[in-house]
Image (cartoon, rainbow, N blue to C red):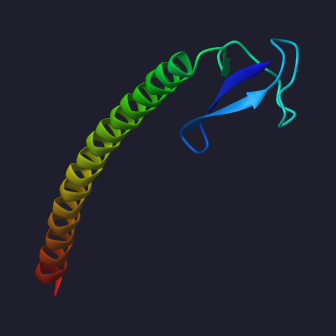
Amino acid sequence: MKLYKVDTKLWTVRAVNGEPYPGTDTDGDTCFSNTHYPSETRAWESLLVNVSASAEFAASNLIEAKGRLADAEAYAGRMAEALAFVQQQLDERKAKRA
C-alpha cells in the first residue's frame, strides 16, 4: 500500500510502499505510526510538529549555553581581579622585606 514517510534526515516527506506496523516499507524501515502516514498532508503536518519541537529544543539549549557562558565570563573576570590583587599583595610584602 502507498504510505507517506516522514524523513527527519532530509526533512522531507516521500511516498513509499509498505504495510502498517509491524510491516516494512520499500526502504526496509519499519512502518511506525509516527513515521508513515496514509495521507501526505498528515505526514507533512507531523514533520512540521517534529521540526518545530526540534527548533524550540535547539533554541532552549542555546539560551542555556549563553547563560552558562556569561556566568563563566563573569567568574573568569572575578578570578583575574583576585589574581591581580593577590599578586599585588605578595609584591608589596616582598618589597617591605627587602
Between 93 and 73, the residue placed more toward the observer is 73
How many numbered marks are there?
0
**Is 22 drawn above or below residue 60 in the view shown?**
above
**Is 72 drawn above or below residue 41 in the view shown?**
below
Q: Is residue 56 left or right of residue 84?
A: right
Q: Quadrant of the C terminus?
A: bottom left
Residue depicted at 45% across the width and 21% down the height? 49
Q: Is residue 21 left or right of residue 67?
A: right
The x and y percentages for residue 3 are: 71, 21
The x and y percentages for residue 12 are: 55, 38
Between 29 and 66, the residue placed more toward the observer is 29
Residue depicted at 59% across the width and 16% down the height? 39
Between 55 and 37, the residue placed more toward the observer is 37
The x and y percentages for residue 40 are: 56, 22
Residue depicted at 35% across the width and 32% down the height? 60
The x and y percentages for residue 66 are: 28, 45
Q: Is residue 64 left or right of residue 21?
A: left
Q: Quadrant of residue 71?
A: top left
Q: Quadrant of residue 19?
A: top right
Between 59 and 27, the residue placed more toward the observer is 27
Q: Quadrant of the N terminus?
A: top right
Residue depicted at 39% across the width and 36% down the height? 61
**Is 19 drawn above or below residue 93 in the view shown?**
above
Residue at the limit of the structure toward the front, as seen here: 1
